[in-house]
Amino acid sequence: MNIFALFKKRKATPQELTPVEILRLTQASLPEIYKDCEHFIQSKDFLNHNEWGLALDTLIAMADEKGHYFSEDFWLNLAICADKMQMIQQSEYCRLQISRPNPPLQTFAPP
């Protein structure tokens, strides 16, 4: 066994993180295009004021904005976070989003 393998830092899974850590991880992992959205900004503000439930709700609400699509990891992280905070409805909603088919890609149609 390689001695250096003992010192490698293992990446924590969402199940091992606290709700606030999951929310921060989820916010940080979003592409830059989403970081100007009002819901994202509100989520950061709520998280900075220890309003974890509201931070979660506003991240979920980003999906209602026209044209936004989020990955399976995004929804799974939010579902795990909601489970940890015992927010059952939000958890169920996030898990339903995982099983939803991806939206079709828009194609360019010349005039």
Image: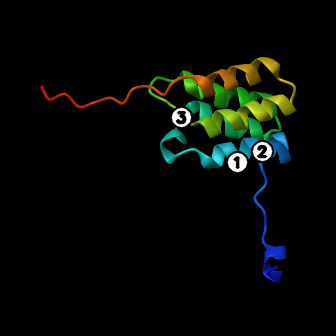
Q: Tell me if 100 is positioned left or right of 3 in this view.
A: left
Residue at horizontal 56 percent and vertical 26 percent from the top: 63
What residue is shown with label 1? 25
In front here: 29 or 52?
29
Q: Amino acid at mark 2?
A: Pro
For this orientation, the residue located farthest to the left is 111
Element assignment for label 3: loop
Residue at horizontal 64 percent and vertical 49 percent from the top: 28
Residue 84 in percent (x, y) is at 86, 33
Residue 92 in percent (x, y) is at 74, 20
Residue 34 in percent (x, y) is at 52, 39
What residue is shown with label 3? 37
Element assignment for label 2: helix
Q: Is residue 36 above or below residue 10?
A: above
- Contact, mark 2 vs mark 1 (Cβ under 8 Å): yes
Residue at horizontal 46 percent and vertical 23 percent from the top: 66
Mark with earlier residue (3, 1) = 1
For this orientation, the residue located farthest to the front is 1
Q: Neighbour class for label 3 at 10 Å: few (<14), some, many (≥20)?
A: few
Which label number is shown at residue 71? none
Q: CA distance from mark 2 to mark 1?
A: 9 Å
What residue is shown with label 2? 14
Q: Quadrant of the N terminus?
A: bottom right
Q: CA distance from mark 3 to mark 2?
A: 24 Å
Q: Is residue 75 above or below residue 27?
A: above
Mark with earlier residue (3, 2) = 2
Q: Neighbour class for label 2 at 10 Å: few (<14), some, many (≥20)?
A: many
Q: Amino acid at mark 3?
A: Cys
